[in-house]
Image: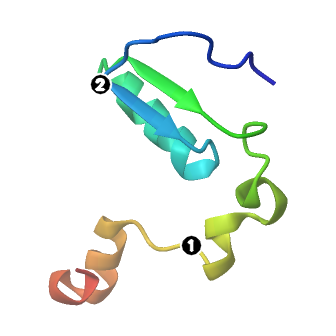
Amino acid sequence: AYAPLDGDATCDVCVIGLGGSGLAAVHALLAHGRRVIALDAATVGGGAAGRNGGFLLAGLAAFHHDAVAAHGRRRAR
């Protein structure tokens, strides 16, 4: 566990919730040079994403370029 946020902080973006989507957002924002503060109520990946795969329950979607190759651009969209 990380220390709680104490006092004022300055950032470009604050990401709340550090499951799979939140962590991906933090990673992308940092890669684009943004100053990021990431917050979660408990532990990183400890919510639904950490217990049961969260977004993976519905299955994995094809990457867009693969869907275009398999189904055509209109249907993939």
Residue 63 at x, y percent in the picture: 39, 66
Residue 43 at x, y percent in the picture: 78, 37
Numbered mark located on residue 74 in the image: none
**Amino acid type shown at disc 2:** His
Disc 1 residue crowd, few under 14, some 14–19, many 20+, Cα 10 Å: few
**For residue 76, above or below residue 53:** below
Q: Residue at x 30, y 17 (%)?
A: 33
Residue denoted by label 1: 60
- Point out the image quarter for the N terminus: top right
Residue denoted by label 2: 32
- Labels 1, 2: front one: 2
Viewer-side residue, 68 vs 23 = 23
Horizontal side of 42 relative to 39 (left or right) equals right
Q: Residue at x 56, y 72 (%)?
A: 60
Horizontal side of 29 relative to 39 (left or right) equals left
Q: Residue at x 36, y 18 (%)?
A: 11
**For residue 69, above or below residue 63:** below
- Point out the image quarter for the C terminus: bottom left
Q: Mark 2 or mark 1, which is nearer the start of the sequence?
A: 2
Q: Residue at x 83, y 59 (%)?
A: 51
Q: Quadrant of residue 35?
A: top left
**Amino acid type shown at disc 1:** Leu
